Image (spheres, rainbow, N blue to C red):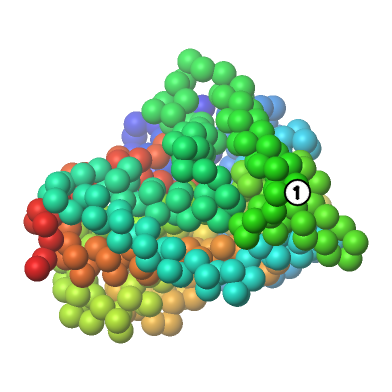
Amino acid sequence: MTTSTATDTWAERPDLSDIGFWTLPIAERAAAFAALRERDPVPFFPEPDIGLPRGPGFYALTRYDDVVAASRNPAVFTSGKGATNVVDQPPEFREFYGSMINMDDPRHARLRRIVSRGFTPRRLADLTDEVQRTASAIVDDVIDQGECDAVGAISARLPLKIVCDMMGVPESQYGFVFDRTNTILGVGDPEYVAETDDIIGALLQAGHDLAELMRDLGRHRVEHPTDDVTSALVNAEVDGERLTSDELASFFILLVVAGNETTRNAISWGLHLLTEHPDQRRIWLDDIDGVTPTAIEEIVRWASPVIYMRRTLSTDAVVGGTQLHEGDKVALFYWAANRDPERFPDPDAFDVRRSPNPHVGFGGAGPHFCLGAHLARREMTVMFRELLTRVPDIAATGEPQRLKSMFINGIKHLPVAFTPGGVG
C-alpha cells in the first residue's frame, strides 16, 4: 500500500484506497470528502493492497441520501460477498469474521432472529445497573490520579466488561479478548501488527483464539446453563433451528469487535471534542439531563467510528446519477454521509444540542442496522454522566493517537488530566 506525503493535493485528488489519506488530520479528510460530494459524489477507486488479490476497484458513496437509499435496498446492495472490506475475501474467511453482517436474507434473517433472543428489551434493561456500576468503578479507579490514558483506563474498559459479562467470559480473559480485538481491527497499524509480520496470519490467529474461547464456553453452557447471553444463544431455538458452534463463535467475534471498538472510540472522540470545544462542554454541564441525549447522538455523528461498509450490486442500478452494474462494489461512507451539508447544517461543527440529528453512525436504515445501538447509547450516556458529574474538568492534554485504518475511525491513546479527587 503506497503512502502519500503531498497532503495539499488530497482535496483535489483524494485516493481513498491510499492509507495516507486515512492518516490525514480530520479537517483535511472532511475537506476532501466535501470536494467529492460537490464534484464527483460516486467516485471510483482502486482497491487497497492488504495482502489479498485485488479486484477491479470500488465506487464510494459520499452523500447522505445515496448511503441511506443503498442501506434500505439490501436486495440490490447485497452484503453476502463481504461488508467489512472492499477487497474480496475467501468465503470461509468473511463468514468467520463478519458473521451476519456478511450475509443476505434468508440466512441473515435466520441468524438475526436467533441472536436477537440474547438482546431482548428485558435483558438490556437488566444491564442498566451493571453499566452504572462499571462506569462508577472505572472513575473510582482513576479519580485520585489526576491523569491517565483515557482509552486504556476509561473508554475501552466499559464496553469490554459489559460485552464480556453479557457473554459470560470471565474477568481473567478480558485482557486476552482486548488484545485479540485490537489485532483484528488494527491489522494496518504497526502498533498492533508489525509491518514485517504476516498480516493475514495474525488476523487468522486472533480470530481463531476468540473462536476457541467461545466454543469452549458454549459447550459448557449447554451442560451448565446460566443467565448470560451465551446460555440464551446456545439454548435458543427459533423455528426448530439453533446456532451451530461455528455460528456462535463467529457471532462472538462480531460482538466483541463491534461492541467494544465502536463504543470505545465514540467515548474517546467525545473526550477529545469536549476539550476542543469548551463552549459545548459548558452547555452540557449546565444541563446534563437535558443535553445528554442530543450530545451522545452528536458524538456518534461526528466520530462515525465505523467509517464505511461495503455492498455488492446484484443488478444494474443508478446511484447519485452514476450508472452502476451487477457485480460492482460500493462502499457506503457513513463518515462522509454524516457530514453532508444537505442533511446537517454546519456539518463540521460539534453541537451538543444538534436536533434533528438523523446520523448513520450505527449504519443506515435497513436489516443491517446495528443490533447493539441501544446498548452503545446506554454505555455512552452513563459514562459521560459519571465523568461530567465527578471529574467535570477532564480534558485531553495532547492530540489523539489515531488508529491507522480505513475502516475504523479509532483512537489508540488519548492523554487526559483532571483535578485529583474530582469534585466534592
Q: Which residue is mark 1?
A: 222
Residue positioned 57% across, 34% down in the render: 48
Q: Quadrant of the C terminus?
A: bottom left
Residue positioned 23% across, 82% down in the render: 287
- Residue 129 in view here: yes
Find residue 155 and report its horizontal and vertical position in percent.
35, 52
Residue positioned 21% across, 44% down in the render: 148
Q: Quadrant of residue 353?
A: bottom left
Height in image: 171 above or below 110?
A: above
Q: Is disc 1 placed on a helix, strand or loop?
A: helix
Find residue 96 and report its horizontal and vertical position in percent.
71, 39
Find residue 91 and report its horizontal and vertical position in percent.
78, 37
Q: Residue furthest top?
A: 196
Return the residue nearer the eye: 12 or 307: 307
Taking the image as shown, residue 154 lies to the left or right of residue 277, namely right
Q: Quadrant of residue 107?
A: bottom right
Taking the image as shown, residue 176 lies to the left or right of residue 107, namely left
- Residue 27 in view here: no
Return the residue nearer the eye: 67 or 219: 219
Q: Quadrant of residue 191?
A: top left
Residue positioned 46% across, 43% down in the render: 171
Return the residue nearer the eye: 99 or 124: 124
